Amino acid sequence: MAVRVGVIGGGQLARMMIAPAVELGLDLRVLAEGEGMSAQLAATRVGDYRDLETVRAFAKDVDVITFDHEHVPQEVLRALVADGVEVHPGPDALQYAQDKLVMRTKLAELGVPQPDWAAVHDTAELQAFLDDHGGRAVVKTPRGGYDGKGVMVVADAADAAAWFGDFDALLVEELVSFSRELAQQVARRPRGEVVAYPVVETVQRDGVCAEVIAPAPEASDRLVRVAEEIGRQIADGLGVTGMLAVELFETTDERLLVNELAMRPHNSGHWSQDGAVTGQFEQHLRAVADLPLGDAAPRAAWSVMVNILGGPADSTIDERFPAAMAAHPDAKIHTYGKASRPGRKVGHVNVAGDDLDDVVYDARAAAAYFA
Amino acid sequence: MAVRVGVIGGGQLARMMIAPAVELGLDLRVLAEGEGMSAQLAATRVGDYRDLETVRAFAKDVDVITFDHEHVPQEVLRALVADGVEVHPGPDALQYAQDKLVMRTKLAELGVPQPDWAAVHDTAELQAFLDDHGGRAVVKTPRGGYDGKGVMVVADAADAAAWFGDFDALLVEELVSFSRELAQQVARRPRGEVVAYPVVETVQRDGVCAEVIAPAPEASDRLVRVAEEIGRQIADGLGVTGMLAVELFETTDERLLVNELAMRPHNSGHWSQDGAVTGQFEQHLRAVADLPLGDAAPRAAWSVMVNILGGPADSTIDERFPAAMAAHPDAKIHTYGKASRPGRKVGHVNVAGDDLDDVVYDARAAAAYFA
């Protein structure tokens, strides 16, 4: 019988697991938050992922549980493990993606390079950190942040006063002087096998990933090696299973510092669907099902991914499709089946080729049809 | 709203449309012959495709009808068209893929190169053809043949006597002295746009496609051009919409002769899933939904597809998966979710790369795990 992989969460990451699951012959089942989600086609149950009994009922009919997002509460995850359910990544690993203070503490123990940081419990402690770091710093809520939410640059500790009411402690990090942002992805099986993707450059706009270039242009052999080592060290050190994305700053003095972690397929890896021998969604499924990992090598000299963000409410992605396809027959357009709202990620475009300038131009031009 | 594409037939061709449909944001719906078919995930209805009311009810909820196979009766297709349903390919085109005598007659009209052939109504007429063609020929039933069924090499007209009982006339063709078999695929939109894939070499074993090499090795520019012209001429001349596969003989005197036609994604094009910018299943969906066609260029110097045929009844493809994946991390293994029976097509392996010998070896070795 086909291995049954249960995905908690019905967003676009679950949706993009459907294609490789079909080809691999895995039986993909999704616990969706509601009707009509991105991953609707594979949704076998609708319910609240914070409710243990809902999740338990879903888990009963699958061989392994994995995730579209990192929001399933630890107590739910730990109850599943106690029930004997295979959960990948498991709660011990996932806690580091759920709580940024726990993550910073652990990475410090592992000796992984990261920005200066501190746990601050009140505005006085925050002000002390600011005073020590040139008067400005990044404050983050330990939990609940994504796509720029729960993150604030402050020059005055009073700006973060409201957040102290919601959390015991906040994370404060030095404002890193970086030349660019990179992302390193690795996949790790439960039995320990790790495969690394080439490090990529990510371009953020308004705190949201806008564009990814794979591999990172003008990356020295040393940079590529160090990024891969960081990815492997974190995957092993944290016991990650499935895909791990490590967001990195490349500093102006040529160091790599860990910014954020994600333990699932990640926007920085969408290029691999069309640009790598094994795309990240296939790789995640292989890893969580404890199947041998696939080749993560690029299939072209350059791959570029450009996100499609929702445009005006009166137009739909479907209407703009034909013109984009006609003008860019080599572009791979991926849609998430989501209603378009300004700024919402509703799809992305991948282009691969030999000439970086051409590939960047082509991917941006195709995505621009949806802007 | 997403375009709803209805596929009649729930086999592996419908199954392999699921992945590109999800990424393109098309709403794929399948009328399956039964429960648990290959394309089960997208099956919205189970029923008999020969029954007009069943097909009508299915067609009511889709924007366009296409096919997993060519067996839907003409009267059902024509009733749908009379109802105002978009059907691609339509009955006027599909008749040429359904009846080999009708096909041979039409190709003769178009002046497309084909083997010597005749419609024979009895053993006397067949014997006359044999006498004119060196005493041996290929006899085919006009309808109902596939994968070597309904095809027989005869040296004595009496061998075909039984078949004359079932059909008004049989097709007889000269036994072509060929050096190899090729296949040319093209896609055509309802509005006439045509895109051609590179001609490929197909290797048959026991009348079943075993292996495909893309593009066809040692093909001269002239051969590539003539094959493409034949594909375009047939697509235009027969009014094909969707994917068309033209099976060709390359003769020992370097001519190309049309062997068979298929108006759907075809085994000779499975390599394109991983080896072309636009795979044939995506291309078929684009064409039948009348969306702009994608780039059909290869993504690697060489792509090789090897079919996985069912092995001993006591082993399943799932059990052999991990060993094959471990030994061949660059192989793309596609499974059809079908019970394994000796000789049944249950999946295929695609490998792409720069060195043909390596690619052939790798694809065969990966597929051999399932033998």
Image (spheres, coloured by chain):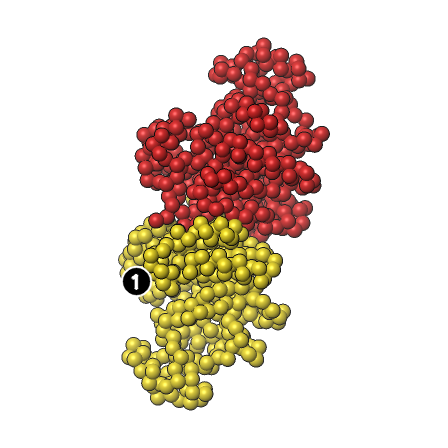
Chain colours: A red, B yellow
At 55% from the left edge and 20% from the top edge, which residue is drawn? A171
Disc 1 sits on a residue from what chain?
A: B
Q: Position of residue B237 (x, y in %)?
A: 49, 70
Residue B296 in which image quadrant: bottom right
Q: Position of residue B15 (x, y in %)?
A: 40, 54
Residue A347 visible, this angle: no
- According to the picture, the residue beneath numbered tag 1 turns out to be B50
Residue A72 in which image quadrant: top left
Q: Position of residue B343 (x, y in %)?
A: 38, 64
At 51% from the left edge and 74% from the top edge, which residue is drawn? B249
At 38% from the left edge and 60% from the top edge, which residue is drawn? B310
Q: Amino acid at mark 1?
A: Arg
At 57% from the left edge and 80% from the top edge, which residue is drawn? B253
Left or right of A356? Residue B33 is left
Q: Residue furthest top?
A: A124
- Nearer the observer, B65 or B21: B21
Q: Is residue B336 above or below residue A217?
A: below
Residue B343 visible, this angle: yes
- Which corner quadrant holds the C terminus of chain A? top right
Residue A37 in which image quadrant: top left
